[in-house]
Image (spheres, rainbow, N blue to C red):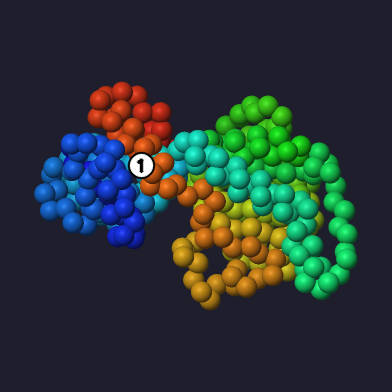
Amino acid sequence: MSVAVYLPDLEKTRWWCRTLAELLPGWSVRPLVEIEDRETVAYAVVWRQRTGDLARFPNLKAIVSVGAGIDHVLADAELPGTVPIIRTVGADLTQRMREYVALHVLRHHRDMPRQLQAQAERDWHQIVVPVAPNRKVGVMGLGNLGAEAARTLAGLGFATRGWSRNAKAIDGVETFAGADGLPAFLDGLEILVNLLPLTAETTGILDGALFAQLAPGACVINCARGAHLVDDDLLAALETGQIKQATLDVFHLEPLPADHPFWTHPAITVTPHIASQIDAATGGRLIAANLQRFEAGEPVPDLADAARGY
Ligand code: OXD
C-alpha cells in the first residue's frame, strides 16, 4: 500500500514518513513531492497541501488531515471531491486543548496581564476578581475539542455556556444552538473561547457585531482558525475597551507576518498555532490505526463530512 505525505515543511514531512513507515510495516510511505508513480498511491496524509497536489493521484482511496480541522484540505480548489477525508483526533489532542483553554481562561479571569504590569512597576496592586462561579465563560463549537474545553471550564467552577450549530447536552454546561440561540449565549459573556470548525457560515463570525453582545471588557480566545476573526474589528473593539484582552493562536496568514499589528499590541497575546499541535509519535499512531481500519473496510470513527465542512 502506498501513502503520500505532504506538510509545508519538507523536514517535518520526512519525520512523519519515517514514523508512519515504522507503524505500517509493508506499506510504502513517501513525501508527496517525490512520488512519480502516481497511480500506485492509495492514501494521502496532508496538512495544507497545495492546490492540485491531490488531484495528481488518480487512485486515492482516502485523504488524512494531520489535525482535527479539514478546512485546510478543502481549501484546495482541485480537490478530488469524492475521496473520503479522515480527521486526526484523539485524547492527546483534546488534552492539549484543555490545557491551553484552561491556562488562558484562568489568565484572563485572574487578570494576569494587569498583575504582571503591576510587578513590572514594583506596585503591590492586589487585584480581586469574582470567584469562578460568578464568571460567565462560553465556548463556541462543541465538537470533540470544544466539548472537552467546556467540561474543563465547568470543572474549574466557571459559569460555563456552550454554543453549537446543533443542540448538544453537556453536564454542567448551559448549551445554546443555532443562529437563534447565539444572542442568549453571548449575552453578558465575559470570556469567549472559539473552537468552531471553519465553514462558510463561521468565517468572520468573530466580528464587531458579535463583540458588541459580550459583556463590556470581555476577553476573547481564538484557538480555532484565523479566518473566524475579523482582525480590524478586534483592533477596533480593543480600542474602545469593549474587548479588554485577546489571546490568539491562529491567524489569517501563518506564520503571522512580522509587520502584523497583533504582534506588538499590548492587549493581545500571540501564540504560534500551538494550542493543540499533534506530535508525530502520537499522531502517527492515530493515523496508522485509521489507515489500517479504512484499508480493512472497518468503520473509521474520525471520518469527516466534507459537505458539512468538518
Ligand atoms: C487542527 C489544528 O486542526 O491544529 O488540529 O489546528
Label 1: few (<14), some or many (≥20) within 10 Å?
Answer: many
Q: Is residue 1 visible?
A: yes
> x and y percent of residue 19 in the render?
31, 45
- Callout 1: SS: helix
> x and y percent of residue 95 in the render?
55, 40
Q: Residue furthest top?
A: 298
> x and y percent of residue 249 in the render?
56, 57
Seen from the viewer's position, the closer of residues 214 and 14 is 14
* Residue drawn at the location 76% of the way across and 65% of the way down: 116
Seen from the viewer's position, the closer of residues 279 and 183 is 279
User: In which quadrant is the C terminus drawn?
Assistant: top left
Q: Is residue 204 visible?
A: no
Does the beta carbon at disc 1 come under 8 Å from ligand 1? no
Dot 1 amino acid type: Gly
User: In which quadrant is the N terminus drawn?
Assistant: top left
Decide if residue 167 is on the left or right side of residue 53: right
* Residue drawn at the location 54% of the way across and 36% of the way down: 143
Identify the image quadrant of residue 64.
top left
Decide if residue 196 is on the left or right side of residue 217: left
* Residue drawn at the location 53% of the way across and 35% of the way down: 144
Seen from the viewer's position, the closer of residues 77 and 264 is 264
> x and y percent of residue 67 in the render?
42, 45
Decide if residue 124 is on the left or right side of residue 212: right
Q: Is residue 187 above or below residue 259?
A: above
Q: Give the residue pinned by disc 1.
A: 284
* Residue drawn at the location 32% of the way across and 49% of the way down: 16
Q: Is residue 257 above or below residue 78?
A: below
Decide if residue 231 is on the left or right side of residue 290: right
